[in-house]
Image (tube, rainbow, N blue to C red):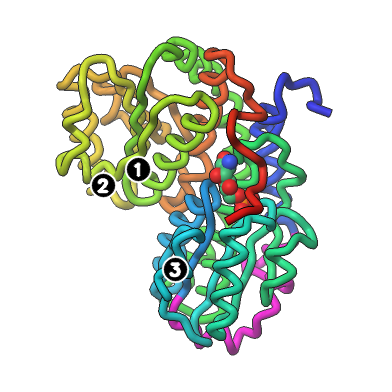
Amino acid sequence: EKGGYDYFMLKEIAEQPKAVADTLLGRIDASGSLTLDEVRIPPRVLREIDKVVVVACGTAFHAGLIAKYAIEHWTRIPCEVELASEFRYRDPILDSRSLVIAISQSGETMDTLMALRHAREQGSRVLAICNTNGSTIPRESDAVLYTHAGPEVAVASTKAFLTQLVACYLVALYLGQVRGTKWADEIRTVVRELAKISGDVERVLETMEPVRELARTLADKKTVLFLGRHVGYPVALEGALKLKELAYMHAEGFAAGELKHGPIALIDEDLPVVVVVPSPRGRSVLHDKIVSNIQEIRARGARTIVIAEEGDEAVVPYADHLIRIPATPTLLQPLVATVPLQVFACELATARGNEVDQPRNLAKSVTVE
Ligand code: M6R
């Protein structure tokens, strides 16, 4: 049942182009507009939403962090993202005009379930983004948008994450469409790009051999740092989480702009630092700033592992290792930038002799608070 792969995780990483395509299937029509019939919250209600709150745990929380960029950009509705385990304990401000989005692969995560119950008690609408049909979280929500990743067996989430991102983009774009924002043209363009993004994920997968080779050379390292900016920041957090779970290595993700506010003190000779570089097109200010970060890190003797868009030449002089990803619209970059980090963590785990599908101390679904 591992389909010829050594681990479920490898199979699930390889299934990502299909998982992404399946999650989009039937949701974008030929004219480039979205139909999310399953989201049975009337457009009238969606037009009145004045706040979105995303609750989730672990990898699903990282999808939520990325959702915030998309939702705020395309809808101009303020969006908060909160760890489900923290949410209800701070007595969050919610009412009937708040839309709470609960993201969960399993649909059984107790922290997320308790957060959504709390939200419903305050009269908020809850939309679940979930991969498991008929599980508790979608059953208790007002509406559900299913991800179609298929069963995810490996404890470390991979294909579910990519499909959660797709679902978050769909919700953000749909809210934008329903409410009619000034971004209507951009939304149409992004919907078209999204429709073909699974081909980009496929292309990334085809170029992963050097990433595996690199990972094997780092098996004796104690720490790996991950840096990103904008949507690349949650990608850095996800890269670090994968490495902790699978390789049992100390790993941390930082917003690159924070480097000078503290973490730069950690940088020393030969420390591997993975940097997710934003596109040089579009938000080029961020691109230039991150290139200076890479220079600073390199100047301190660390080993730079740079994930950058094809054609981005500015990073070349400062990258000890360069991992190329296809150019995508800014907000969609996590769909391609996360894949090398999954492969990297999986290979490091293997090189360290760890059990890839069943990391120590972890369960696939966490049904206690
Ligand atoms: O089933 P869920 O999406 O609610 O699970 C949330 C987290 O427990 C999960 O993402 C966990 O962090 C994974 N092991 C990450 O790889």
Q: Which residue is mark 1?
A: 278
Mark 2 close to ligand 1, CB under 8 Å: no
Category of crowding for the residue at label 2, using alpha-carbon neighbours closer than 10 angstroms: few (below 14), some (14–19), many (at least 20):
many
Q: Is residue 58 above or below residue 65?
A: above
Q: Is residue 6 above or below residue 36?
A: above
The label nearer to you, 1 versus 3, is: 3
Tell me the element at label 3.
helix
* Dots 2, 1 in contact, CB < 8 A: yes
The label nearer to you, 2 versus 3, is: 3
Category of crowding for the residue at label 1, using alpha-carbon neighbours closer than 10 angstroms: few (below 14), some (14–19), many (at least 20):
many
Mark 3 close to ligand 1, CB under 8 Å: no
Residue at horizontal 47%, vertical 17%?
215
Magenta region, main secondary structure: loop
Identity, as a three-letter code, of the amino acid under mark 2: Leu
x and y, in percent, of residue 96 in the image = 53, 87
Disc 1 or 3, which lies upstream in sequence? 3
Q: Which residue is mark 3?
A: 89
Tell me the element at label 1.
loop
Residue at horizontal 73%, vertical 63%?
136
| C-alpha separation, residue under disc 1 versus residue under disc 3 | 35 Å
Identity, as a three-letter code, of the amino acid under mark 3: Tyr
Q: Is residue 137 magenta?
A: no
Q: Which residues are magenta?
A: 26-51
Q: Which residue is mark 2?
A: 286
Q: Is residue 300 left or right of residue 338?
A: left
Residue at horizontal 33%, vertical 21%?
272
